[in-house]
Image: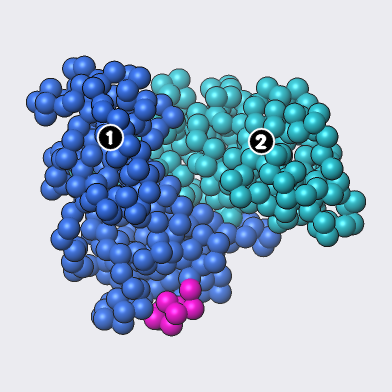
Chain colours: A blue, B cyan
Amino acid sequence: MVSKSQIKLITSLAQKKYRQQHGLFVVEGLKGISEFLESNFNLQSLFALEGCFKDERPTEVTAAELKKISFLKTPQKALALFEIPEDLNKVEAGFQLVLDDVRDPGNLGTLIRLCDWYGIKNLICSKETVDCFNPKVVQATMGSLTRVNLIYTDLSHHLAAQDLPVYAAFMDGKSVYKEGLPQDAILILGNEANGISDVVAENIQHKISIPQFGQSTTESLNVAVAGAILVSEFKRN
Amino acid sequence: MVSKSQIKLITSLAQKKYRQQHGLFVVEGLKGISEFLESNFNLQSLFALEGCFKDERPTEVTAAELKKISFLKTPQKALALFEIPEDLNKVEAGFQLVLDDVRDPGNLGTLIRLCDWYGIKNLICSKETVDCFNPKVVQATMGSLTRVNLIYTDLSHHLAAQDLPVYAAFMDGKSVYKEGLPQDAILILGNEANGISDVVAENIQHKISIPQFGQSTTESLNVAVAGAILVSEFKRN
């Protein structure tokens, strides 16, 4: 049974200001919730159809009730609220992927999965980058959010304090296939429409590019796709 | 001015059966429409705010009218209907990217852009793969749809008739970073949830994998991201 006030709380968590006010975010689906339960995140409440997550003593709900609280077109069997951790994440040694205003939740979710796959611990985001606790981002990460260290910060300040070489993709950069790339570096990806901002670009030492094999009219690759190809090039050696 | 019957026609084109019935699909935005105008696609009608596409003599519409016919949350300045070409595309020589039931419109759009960037002419799709004239796919392709040759067909029949070596990604495949890859090949990508179907898998000669650098609990990469990394490996040499 879900109360009216619980429905109101949960649906409010679509918005960042209410996630921040309540310190909570939503995870849906058995697999996603299991990954968060096994991680350092703290469970606040759990709603599930009969027979799911018995050990966790969930609030049992009907499919109709689940539909009222779910953010998905096709609700999964369970929905959980987890606490947003208060501790600020610290930058770990090693490769850093830096996002300068990536706005699309699907792109951020995909990039979090990419970091998880390639063992990249540090995903540094500008403050205007979409919030990682946005329900669409959480859904797109498939649990990878539990294993990647996201830090929202002022990129100019952050980059000025780092020792690693700083790379970013530009149309006129050197071919990434011909550059000798270091194992550890900082790689910056820009906004979907506007690319990398001028103030962040001042910190870039190495301009690289993904060579274009097709017609020159092709404008660009999706930011998550470009990020994947570039990260792969750094990690393949 | 947009008539009621035009609104009804345009909104119906969200569904594949009406696109097929009318032989039409929707393109939105100045840049996208310009790319289709410059291609071999035939324009059927064009709706635009005052001052846009004067040479094409568009039906002039107000922002409120555009909102009624647009599929976008934030409508662009123009919306066009183009004819779905009747000619069946033919497979050209060279690399083939094959999609076995990719269902997400954003993923297909991103993969079409990837093919365009890397000059891959042939994108062969199973009949269950999302329709490339779906408005969300057209929007995600950013005009690349005008330059990539999409063919919807029975994959088993198609693959049986090809001479190129057939590759696909599997968890237990050989590292793609260590394989000597040919310039021309067939690369198969599977469904987002279920991977490659058994009947298609029978045609695969080379199982490859993207090595996992992170924890083994990481389940998978997004299909467009995996496709990008693999295509990059084929094309980088």
Question: Which residue has dot 1 on it?
Answer: A5
Vertical order, B76 against A47 (above or below): below
Q: Is residue A178 magenta?
A: no
Q: Position of residue A19 (x, y in %)?
A: 30, 50
Mark number displayed over residue B233: none
- Tell me the SS state at disc 2: loop
Q: Which residues are magenta?
A: A197-205
Q: Which residue is painted at 46% across and 52% down in the image? A: A104
Q: Gap between marks 2 and 1, in whole Å?
A: 43 Å
Identify which residue, A84 or B19, lies in the foreground. Answer: A84
Residue B38 locus on image (x, y percent) = 80, 53
Q: Amino acid at mark 2?
A: Phe
Classify the position of the N terminus of chain B by image quarter: top right
Residue at the left extreme, as displayed = A55
Using the image, name the chain to which the residue with label 1 belongs.
A
Which residue is label 2 attached to?
Answer: B133
Tell me which chain the residue with mark 2 is part of. B
Q: Is residue A211 left or right of residue A6?
A: right
Name the one closer to the observer, A24 or B186.
A24
